[in-house]
Image (cartoon, rainbow, N blue to C red):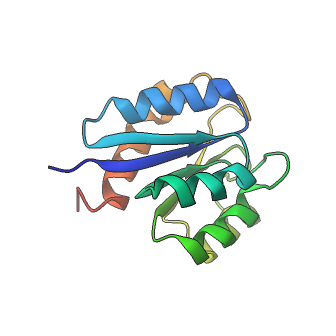
Amino acid sequence: METKRVLIVDDSFVMRAILADLTASDPAFTIVGEAENGRVAIEKTKETKPDLVLLDIEMPEMDGIEALKRLRLLSKAQVIIVSSLTQVGSPIAAEAKRLGAFAVIAKPSGTLSLDIDEKKGSEIVRTMRKASGLDP
């Protein structure tokens, strides 16, 4: 089985590392790149052609909402928003869904959620599998 290609986008090196560990925990996924902001994410998407993008919202240079708009134009990759700004029912969460995000997952403890693995890890991996068409 061919693995699904994943791009991880977050301005925090620590959050990228945690999300990379979560992604690597499922053999169905291969990390093809990381980006620290939306501008770099657009370039990496052109280079790596991911199937799936894990995207933060609050980042310097280009935020996740602007990156999502541009990603929709150049890639068929499914986008999962993982952000402290997207609590259930928030206007930003609604905007991300309207712009085509497959799912919106809130970081449990703010911008640097060191507990995201234990609190949201299985939800993130389940959502990645659904977005990739691996699970119903």
5 vs 93, left or right, is: left
Percent x, y of residue 16: 59, 32
Q: Is residue 133 visible?
A: yes
**Residue 97, quarter of picture:** bottom right
Which sits in the foreground, 72 or 94? 72
Which residue is the extreme one toward the left?
A: 1
Q: Is residue 104 visible?
A: no
128 vs 105, left or right, is: left
Q: Is residue 46 above or below residue 83?
A: below
Q: In this view, does 68 lie above or below 134?
A: below
Count of numbered tags: 0
**Quarter in which the C terminus is drawn:** bottom left
Q: In this view, does 120 lie above or below 115?
A: below
Q: Which residue is drawn at 85% across and 51% down?
A: 61
Percent x, y of residue 130: 32, 58
Q: Is residue 76 above or below residue 114?
A: below
**Residue 81, quarter of picture:** bottom right
27 vs 93, left or right, is: left
Which sits in the foreground, 50 or 14? 50
Which sits in the foreground, 96 or 17? 17
Which residue is the extreme one toward the front?
A: 47
Q: Which residue is drawn at 51% across and 70% down?
A: 75
Percent x, y of residue 79: 52, 60
Q: Which residue is drawn at 64% across and 52% down?
A: 41
**Residue 17, quarter of picture:** top right
Percent x, y of residue 10: 67, 40
Q: Residue at x 33, y 59 (%)?
A: 132
Which residue is the extreme one toward the right?
A: 61
